[in-house]
């Protein structure tokens, strides 16, 4: 039996649309065994597809097809701690788990770059699958069908406050809200800030993150889909966060704080409960996951 543990991820990190992402300390756990039929179960009660349309199974099948090996079936179990459709990479966790689990069952025939390229082809962009697989803070690009990524371990002194609402926001709906064309000015605005965010994480100059995570390409169009989103941004910054941004496609709002600032989380939780508008949010204290997906 193969077990794969995959972290939650927070994509875009503000300005790095479809290219930046980081891994945090919330995990899904999957087990894999070869079987003569498809048998998929959830061990935590979360509803998951039990047939060949299951995303974990479909991703595993891609590996078998890539290697030209017939697949009769798999026995898969899922423990789903990452909330679905909340902008924390739940689908990417399934994709990465399926690919890594299948590769392990078949004797580790694929390289990490090959697996990352397969995962990106399934997901459509590398901003979640790359940190899910590699851990840490990851910058990724796609060039001529290949994915190129650079990982930087995240400073353990940082923590992440995930403001997670009690409603889902499907990525397809969040992407549909985006304009088809953007101005040269907005493109330069984001390009410069994505570069600055990468430099800030690499150099440890976290005072820059408040500027580096500002965005002109997607957040202003997605915030109207997140009830109370603007107010959560304001709350996080008022409580002393270094930065706040929409995690992935949303609806989670992620804030970057100092690990030892326990008072931030206490004050945030109290403020959410005291506000009728924000009561549907829950704040989670997450740390960086620099290890990425682990196969055992």
Image: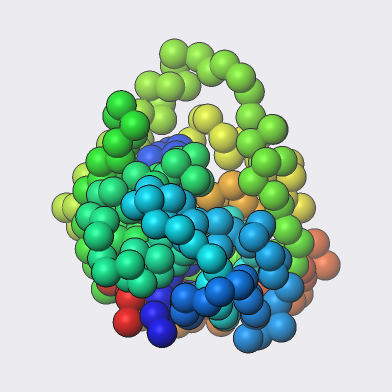
Who is closer to the viewer here, 106 or 213? 106
Front residue of 239 and 218: 218
Q: Position of residue 221 (x, y in %)?
A: 65, 34
Name the residue at the left extreme. 203
Q: Nearer the viewer, residue 136 or 215?
A: 136
- Relative to 188, residue 169 above or below: below
Tell me which residue sits at (28%, 48%) in the image: 114
Residue shown at 40% from the left, 66% from the top: 102
| Residue ID at (67%, 41%) | 172
Q: Percent position (x, y) of residue 165?
A: 70, 64
Give residue 277's position: percent from left, percent from top.
80, 62
Tell me how the rendering is colored.
Answer: rainbow
Residue under the point 33% across and 67% down: 106
Q: Quadrant of the C terminus?
A: bottom left
Classify 232 as above or below 295: above
- Residue 103 in the image, given as x and y percentages of width and height: 34, 64
Please identify the quadrant where the N terminus is shown.
bottom left
Residue 278 seen in the figure? no
Q: Check the image and report above or below for 157 versus 92.
A: below
Work out whether residue 67 can be spotted.
yes
């Amino acid at each position: 039996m193969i077990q794969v543990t995959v972290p939650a991820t927070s994509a875009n990190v503000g300005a790095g649309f479809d290219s930046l992402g980081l891994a945090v300390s919330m995990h899904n756990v999957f087990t894999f065994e070869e079987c003569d039929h498809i048998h998929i179960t959830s061990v935590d009660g979360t509803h998951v597809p039990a047939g060949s349309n299951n995303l974990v199974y479909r991703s595993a099948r891609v590996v078998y097809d890539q290697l030209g090996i017939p697949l009769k079936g798999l026995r898969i179990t899922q423990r789903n701690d990452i909330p679905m459709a909340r902008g924390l990479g739940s689908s990417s966790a399934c994709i990465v788990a399926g690919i890594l689990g299948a590769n392990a069952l078949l004797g580790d025939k694929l390289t990490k770059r090959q697996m990352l390229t397969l995962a990106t082809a399934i997901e459509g962009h590398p901003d979640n699958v790359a940190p899910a697989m590699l851990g840490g803070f990851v910058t990724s690009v796609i060039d001529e069908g290949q994915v190129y990524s650079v990982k930087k371990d995240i400073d353990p002194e940082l923590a992440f406050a995930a403001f997670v609402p009690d409603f889902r926001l499907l990525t397809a709906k969040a992407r549909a809200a985006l304009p088809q064309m953007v101005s040269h000015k907005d493109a330069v605005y984001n390009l410069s800030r994505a570069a600055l965010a990468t430099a800030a994480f690499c150099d440890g100059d976290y005072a820059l993150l408040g500027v580096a995570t500002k965005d002109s390409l997607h957040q202003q169009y997605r915030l109207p889909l997140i009830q109370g989103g603007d107010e959560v941004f304001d709350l996080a910054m008022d409580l002393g966060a270094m930065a706040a941004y929409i995690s992935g496609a949303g609806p989670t709002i992620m804030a970057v704080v100092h690990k030892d600032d326990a008072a931030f989380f206490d004050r945030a939780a109290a403020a959410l409960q005291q506000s009728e508008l924000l009561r549907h949010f829950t704040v989670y204290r997450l740390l960086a996951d620099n290890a990425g997906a682990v196969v055992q």
